Image: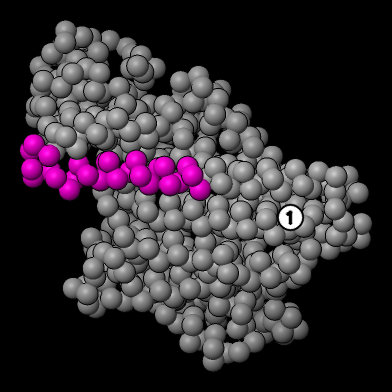
Amino acid sequence: MLTTSAVALPLLCAYQRPPLPAFFNQALALLLWSCTLLVVASANRGTLRPRNTSTAAALVSPLGLWAMLLSVALAHAITGLTPTFVAAPIALNLGLALLLSAAVAWLSPNPKQLKRWLRALLIGILIGALFNALVALVQSVAPNWADDVWIARSLLPHDRVGGNLRQPNQLATLMVWGLLATSFFWRRKALLWFIFSAPLLVTLVATGSRTGMVSLLLIVIVALLRSRRVRLWRMKGWLALLLAVAPLVWIAASIFTRSTANAALTQRLALWRDVRELICQHPWFGVGWGQLNFAWTLTPLPKRAADVFDHAHSLPLHLAAELGAPFAALLLLLLGTLLWRARRALRSSHGATAALLLATVLLHSLFEYPLWFSYFLLPSAAVLAWLVCFAKVPSDQSLVGIETPGATWLRSAFRLAAVLSIAGVAFAGNEYQKAVAIHRVVDRPVELIRAIEIAQGSPLFGHFGDYAAIMTSGDTAAPALFTRPIRHVLDERLLSAYARMLARTGDSQRAAFVVARAREFQPDATFENLPSVARSAPAFTARDFRR
């Protein structure tokens, strides 16, 4: 029940308050998964001890993936490469992914328990997908019903829907996950399968997501190739495959050729070109976790991508840019090894469904960043561990329910980690209200000043208070106010204010460099107030602007 809730409820949540989109969805995911861990650690009477060394290594290997990422995040925070307020939420997500992998690998290695757990996860996905399909329908035909509590208001073009996730590509991935869950439960009951699949498929098409259509094509092809009936049909089976895929190809073609498709592709290619340049300039250790926007904005790029970005929109490129190419290659190699070890799980319907869940989100990660959202990251981390565990445990006859000497200590450590995670989420939620308060009193000057001062004292969200102070102070903003906001997201307004501050305080060389970077962006009304400085700016790097 807890697993189902941890998956479904964050996907249902429509409540949002600026400045961070999807904050409450992610906080709810972190909270519920932490509660799930706490219950699992308290209820489990022991752990299983694999006497086979290779099996033990396989079960522990998913933990190594998350431990490596968590270690880098902590190292970047300690060395100052990444500010603490940026590293903290990253570390919390990675730490919880590590604990979930450990829970799946060591606290529930019984095949029956694993199957039951996967079914609970799929039920949560199906609930979230069906509800979001209903939300998408309301957004399309009755947008006035949206209240931003149960149904999110859509700010998207009318030909695309985003559901309560407010993002078409994320909604598309959820719809594909929902189709997988539907097929798992009702693949032998055609009428029920159609009843539940039809709204999900219609919503998937309505998202206009190219990645979603490619994922659907992949799933249809895999499903037909795995079908015993299709294999028996031989040449007729291939004809059935073509007939099934043809309408999907036609729908995909219409999505790929929509009016905004070429512009989006051009922008994405320009971004990837910029990120490749950053990787070439910082090949070994990267620019720092969460510092892509900071480094990208303050790096000379004459053919800069048009919009402001804080993510590479490609998992391999992003890891290489922020963590360094060698470390990114090592991570991808480890992930590939884990997937290869999990191939035996594909022989069952449970394993094939789990593998396609993971394949869908990894395919999406090649073009977007769904794994940067807790409600996709944490289920994906658990599914990855499940695949590795399920592939190894059934064949290892030495895995029996025995109490290990360290079982009591392990349960206590899990309980402590889960409690700390719950406390961390509660603390973050309370601190976030300080940033939200700024937007609630934006039209009341006296209260606004007080709200800004309170927000600036937050260790997690103080940069939002600094940003608001800069915007309300105009050209009298103190230099110290820029220290935190520029390391979060350097947008057009902040970049222009930063250039003016540098010029006002006599740092003409840095001001000229920042102005030159602003002029690389597309013309914007914000840049009309850039200071008059020499056109020839000296050579700096983003490192020179860290404080």
Query: Image quadrant of residue 68?
Result: top right
Q: Position of residue 61 (x, y in %)?
A: 73, 44
- Whether residue 439 is in magenta: the answer is yes
Q: Nearer the viewer, residue 61 or 410?
A: 410
- Residue linked to disc 1: 107
Relative to 408, 90 lies left or right? left
Q: Nearer the viewer, residue 190 or 408?
A: 408
Relative to 345, 66 lies left or right? left
Q: Nearer the viewer, residue 28 or 338?
A: 28
* Residue found 43% across the figure and 51% down from its top: 27
Q: Amino acid at mark 1?
A: Leu
- Against 509, residue 438 (above or below) is below
Q: Position of residue 437 (x, y in %)?
A: 22, 44
- Against 194, residue 291 (above or below) is above
Query: Image quadrant of residue 69?
Result: top right
Q: Position of residue 230 (x, y in %)?
A: 69, 82
Q: Position of residue 462 (x, y in %)?
A: 30, 32
Q: Nearer the viewer, residue 242 or 155?
A: 155
Asked if one can make out residue 192 in the rendered structure from this viewpoint, the answer is yes
User: Which region shows up in magenta?
Assistant: 422-447
Q: Which secondary structure lies at badge 1? A: helix
Asked if one can make out residue 337 in the rendered structure from this viewpoint, the answer is no
Q: Which quadrant of the rendered structure holds the N terminus?
A: bottom right
- Against 96, residue 153 (above or below) is below
* Residue found 52% across the figure and 63% down from its top: 7
Relative to 168, 249 lies left or right? right
* Residue found 22% across the figure and 17% down from its top: 479
Q: Which quadrant of the rendered structure holds the C terminus?
A: top left
- Whether residue 283 is in magenta: the answer is no
